[in-house]
Amino acid sequence: MTATSTIKPLNRGLGQEAWYRPAGNEIELFEQAAQHQLPVLIKGPTGCGKTRFVQHMAERLGRKLYTVACHDDLTTADLVGRHLIGSNGTFWQDGPLTRAVREGAICYLDEIIEARKDTTVVLHPLADDRRILPLDATGECLEAAPGFMLVVSYNPGYRNLLKGLKPSTRQRFVAMSFDYPDAAAETEILATEAGLDADTAATLVRLGNALRHLGQHDLEEAPSTRLLIHAGRLMRSGLDPLSACQACLAQPLTDDPTVQAAILDVVRAHF
Ligand code: ADP
């Protein structure tokens, strides 16, 4: 894994704002955290809008965003940078965290809990009043530019309970908890993101909530807003609801044919 391959630039063209439907006071909270140079921790299940929210806030605050999808092989070098060998010898290449620190950008570490424990240590002096990033490999000690903001997220689902974030890490953050949007908000999101009419969007949301209820017993993870949007997009482009829900809900959610059949029964009851 190279440092550059972990960087996902904001993948939106000019004039294409990251639309975000707020659920509560999260926008104000984030703005306050930014104003006071405090780092932010967002907890919530996968596909519930965490990344979209951070994209929206970066645009709103006019700051560049570096997103890193964390995984269990992610090393400190993937975050801060490393020496590389080029045609003129070795040179230093900043990682996404270092770039954000220098440029006063937002660095968003998605699913931080997946990263190796030692990587979170480098975050500590950045996440308190010191706001510094010591680069052992170059001997530099960078002071974060004023706009720098550290944002991390994780899914506190049952598989992550044991891994948890260390108290010494989590107590540095302004924390907020996300969940699937309520029915009215999710209907609006489906209508906007999948281009569905209000009735179909509302039906898909009811289906999603029915499956979330089922999910507590049979599914490892409940269907996210993201999955509902995918199903909605296929329906919007002409696929029949059963096929769309089979491909976008039943198959991604489980490999168990019995549970898939149960999901399709719930789909048939709605469409
Ligand atoms: P997460 O980062 O929590 O895994 P995302 O932010 O990628 O999830 O959300 C998945 C998709 O759901 C987004 O791309 C967006 O289309 C939609 N979405 C979810 N919540 C919202 C919201 N509150 N406003 C707008 N879109 C949303």
Image (tube, grey):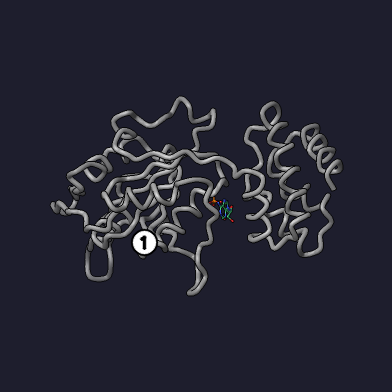
Image check: 49 left or right of 87?
right
Q: Does residue 81 appear in the picture of this structure?
A: no
User: Which of these two is toward me, 57 or 126?
Assistant: 57
Image check: 193 left or right of 103?
right
When the figure is inspected, residue 256 is found, relative to residue 145, above or below; the finding is above
Amino acid on which disc 1 is placed: Leu
- Circle 1 is placed at which residue position? 61
Q: Does residue 98 appear in the picture of this structure?
A: yes
Residue lying farthest to the bottom in this orientation: 14
Tell me the SS state at disc 1. Answer: helix
Q: Are there few (<14), some (14-19), or many (20+) residues within 10 Å of tag 1?
A: some
Image point 50% across, 45% down: which residue? 24
Across and down, in percent, residue 120 comes to 32, 39
Image point 68% across, 58% down: which residue? 191
Across and down, in percent, residue 263 comes to 78, 38
In which image quadrant can residue 119 be found?
A: top left
Across and down, in percent, residue 91 comes to 23, 63
Image point 73% across, 60% down: which residue? 196
Across and down, in percent, residue 175 comes to 39, 39
